[in-house]
Image (cartoon, helix red, strand yellow):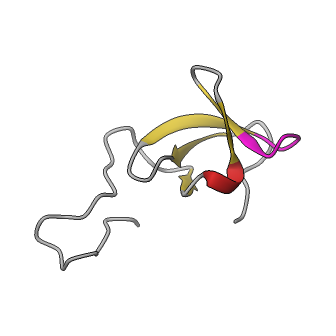
Amino acid sequence: MIRPVDGETVWIEYPEGRHFRAMYDARSDSFATEDASPIGAAVVANWSRQEHEDYDISDQPNAPKGALTRS
């Protein structure tokens, strides 16, 4: 996985389907969340600079089964 820039705040997906903002720490290769709980980068499903808090990557009801709304 390509990592964000050290100290950059991005949107992460962890556990799958749950999105929230976190800051990347290159030294520990982890993401620090707002409640200061570090999450290892290896267990984060995805990260993005462009996501929004209300953005849902879950299956769209009218999309073919398994199609995700990721862009």
Q: Quadrant of residue 42?
A: bottom right
Main SS of residues in magenta: loop
**Residue visible at 20% across and 77% down?**
65
Seen from the viewer's position, the closer of residues 17 and 22 is 17
Spot the residue most to the top: 35
Seen from the viewer's position, the closer of residues 32 and 51 is 32
Magenta range is 25-30
Q: Quadrant of the C terminus?
A: bottom left
Q: Quadrant of the N terminus?
A: bottom right
Residue 4: horizontal and vertical position, in percent?
A: 72, 51
68 vs 39: above or below: below
53 is within the stretch colored magenta: no
59 vs 18: above or below: below
Spot the residue most to the right: 27
60 left or right of 35? left
27 is within the stretch colored magenta: yes
59 left or right of 14? left
**Residue visible at 69% across and 50% down?**
41
**Residue visible at 84% across and 40% down?**
28
Q: Quadrant of residue 7?
A: top right
